[in-house]
Amino acid sequence: MTDSIRRFSSRVDDYIKYRPTYPPAVVRLLADECRLTTDSIIADVGSGTGILSEMWLRHGSRVFGIEPNREMRAAAERLLQNYAHFASVDATAETTTLADRSVDFVTAGQAFHWFDAERARREFARILKPDGWVVLMWNERRTDTTPFLVAYEELLQTFGTDYREVNHAQIETRSINSFFAPSRFKLATFDNEQVFDLEGLQGRLQSASYTPQAGHPNHGPMLERLHVIFEQHQVHGRVTVEYDTKVYYGHVSTRDVVG
């Protein structure tokens, strides 16, 4: 399996253009239940190109974007350069380099499944202020609610290089309970979607780290199949990718944390 830090390096442009954002309802949820305010300090871990970081910045919070991938971190620095409260940090979830008890929230969007969960839990507990929150989020693509989504999932199963191994839906079931234990956590789910023309759908497909890239023998056949699927299911030149945005939020135990 490709190094988890480097596997998105060649996909940054497609990631910026075609990955989904998160529903505004997430901000309202955390404001209502977790005391998220414009004064909150957030460590957005595995921040990538800054999709989730920008949502917090627009809310007015101060954000440390923790990202070890050079290309993705550089993209975030460029895209978020006008936000005075953004700081880009070359670090990992397991070693953030932030000070003890320095942040109100640790967030991770589409990233937790790449972490060493136990080491990350200890690090999050170290940098969080007392009663700080961990928020783990995914835009989980629906696979069977429309004929188009069924066909798209079949394409990924056929052509994905390591799709089954890195599918976060498999990982979160095993990890979330043990990560928060013995503390409790809550799960909130929101509807989300993207509407694409053919170019956009192709970009969305190629933003995924488990799809073959140009030069791979399956790249051409994959795109040919994608074009067929699009023509079969498009309505007025568009198809819709539906998601369940899942938000896991709670406190992490300070067991084994020194300091």
Image (cartoon, rainbow, N blue to C red):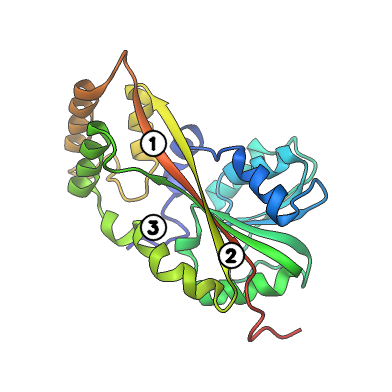
Q: Residue sitting at 27 percent across and 36 percent down?
A: 149
The relative height of residue 99 versus residue 193 in the rendered view (above or below) is below
- Front-most of 60 and 187? 187
Q: CA distance from mark 2 to mark 1?
A: 30 Å
* Number of the label disc, if any, that sits on residue 168: 3
Left or right: 195 in relation to 237: right
Based on the displayed image, in which of its 4 quarters is residue 75 positioned?
top right
Three-letter amino acid code at the position of disc 3? His
Report which residue position mark 2 lands on: 92
Place of residue 196 in the rendered image (x, y in percent of width and height, measured from the top left) = 38, 25
Pinpoint residue 56: horizontal percent, then vertical percent: 69, 44
Single out the mark in the foreground, 3 or 1. 1
* Image position of 59 with respect to 30: above or below: above
The residue that mark 1 highlights is: 242
| x, y percent for residue 15 | 46, 39
Taking the spot 64% from the left edge, 36% from the top edge, the residue there is 79
Dividing the image into 4 quarters, which one contains the C terminus?
bottom right
Q: Residues within 10 Å of mark 2 (few under 14, many from 20)?
A: some
- Looking at the image, tell me whether mark 2 or mark 3 is earlier in sequence order: 2
- Report the residue at 18% width, 30% height from top: 224
Find numbered disc 3 in the image and state the secondary structure of the residue it sits on: helix
Q: Nearer the viewer, mark 2 or mark 3?
A: 3
> Going by the image, does 23 lie left or right of 193?
right
Real-space CA distance between mark 2 and mark 3, rounded to the nearest whole angstrom: 19 Å
**What amino acid is at disc 2?**
Thr
Distance (Cα) linking label 3 and label 1: 16 Å
Which label was assigned to residue 28? none
Q: Amino acid at mark 1?
A: Glu
Relative vertical location of residue 177 with respect to residue 4 in this rendering, above or below: below
Which residue is rendered at x = 41% and y = 54% of the image? 7
Q: Is residue 113 left or right of residue 98?
A: left
